[in-house]
Image: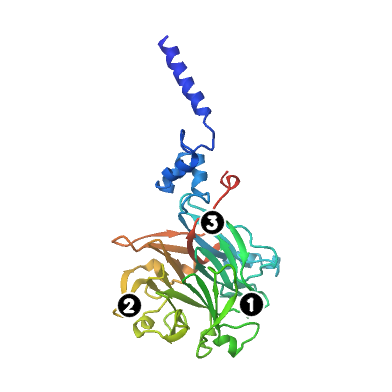
Amino acid sequence: MESNSKHTKHKSSEESSDNIPSNTLLPGLPNHLAELCLSSVHPSLLYKVSHSWRRLIYSPSFPPFFSLYALLSPSPSHQTVRNHMYDSNTNSIKFLSLDPISSTWQPLPSPPPDPPLHILHRHPSFLSRKLPIQMVTVSCHLVLIAATTQQFMPALSRPLVFNPIHNNWFYGPPFSMPRRWCAAGSVAGSVYVASGVGSNYSGDVARSMERWDLKNSLDWKWEKKAGLKDGRFSRESVEAVGYKGKLCMVNVKGNAVKEGAIYDVESDLWEDMPEGMLAGWNGPVATMDEMVMYVVDEAKGALSKYDAKKDCWEKLIELVQLKGAEQMDAGRGRVCVVCAKGERVVVVDVVVRPVRLWVVEPPPDLLVVAVHILPRMSQTVTDLS
């Protein structure tokens, strides 16, 4: 009798559990209230508990955690093998996102087919040379600004934008002049493009600058802004870094002699870069929330933070893993650096002391071109299954 009684209670419990709908988050609570309760729990814990909670953390209604987005291209050895199959109408690049909760690389949706996207990072006849692909992040969007086609022409007549929350691509307003090898950056919710070359070199284009305000969705257009004094910033692709309401840039990468320029967004004026800032700009630079600026010395592997009051760079850590740094982004207390010719991404937590780091590797046969930190992609039930 005791055995039968226990069996009956166990069976009753199973039947009660089976009667709970699969989309119920917390039994006895409406889902909108359950979401409020669960939103305070770290997504990594919710991911492990149930499929319904796993679906919740990727839904548009749940506060998004942040992921690493990467632009990747085939490794030279892999591309050499495929050269005999080369098609000028295909892309040699991929867009992926690393989900920090599941630790998996996930492809972004395909960009719009019209107009078709033809972008090269390495030309099949010049594998030793990398062609720049310029992207910026603004207002939690990923914006592809400039690149090169097989015919060495500007690849984009309009910026191509990815919204991770809605999980879709769309095109922005047409450029007044499509460019490549330009200066590109963002500050205060606007994208800025300066200098560069079009199909041919033009002094007017090399000195020009224009702005697109993503916040003004009713009147999307590129607005002409104050131009540069000369065309010296059109020699190669330039990262214009948004910092305290200004755009900061140098015209040459690495440890070579260079010129610096700063654009004041509010006054629409250009000014010289402070000597200390310019002296320490010896590698890729990124800012955290446009308020704290970091640089990695590509020769020494030293990560430093800029002190505006003293006009100097304060070294945080020097690591052999950071040598050869090529590109970086900063956000959520972390600095992510593309190193070793794209074979790894070094992630440094600059909030904790001592500084902590770990290494992220790209998928097989791919190299990282650039990384950006953005909210995770929203996913459907089909995607998660």
Q: Which mark is residue 154?
A: 1
Image spot of residue 144 (x, y percent): 57, 69
Closer to the camera in the image, 294 or 78: 294
Q: What residue type is labelled 3?
A: Ile
Between disc 2 and disc 3, whose residue precedes?
Answer: 3
The quadrant in which residue 276 appears is: bottom left
Q: Is residue 39 above or below residue 123?
A: above
What's the colour scheme? rainbow
Closer to the camera in the image, 3 or 90: 3
| Mark 2 and mark 3 residues within 8 Å of each other at the beta carbon | no
Is residue 135 visible in the rendered image? The answer is yes
Q: In this view, does 385 lie above or below 331?
A: above
Closer to the camera in the image, 304 or 182: 182
Question: How far apart are the alpha carbons under marks 2 and 1?
Answer: 36 Å
Q: Which mark is residue 362?
A: none
Left or right: 145 as drawn, with respect to 8: right
Q: Name the residue under label 3.
A: 165
Q: Residue at point 54% right, 87% down?
A: 207
Image spot of residue 47 (x, y percent): 46, 44
Q: Mark 2 points at which residue?
A: 308
Between disc 3 and disc 1, whose residue precedes?
Answer: 1
Q: What residue type is labelled 2?
A: Ala
| Mark 3 and mark 1 residues within 8 Å of each other at the beta carbon | no
Looking at this view, name the residue that lies furthest to the front: 218
Dot 3 alpha-carbon crowd within 10 angstroms: few under 14, some 14 to 19, many 20 or more: some
Q: Which amino acid does label 1 sit on?
A: Pro
Element type at mark 1: loop
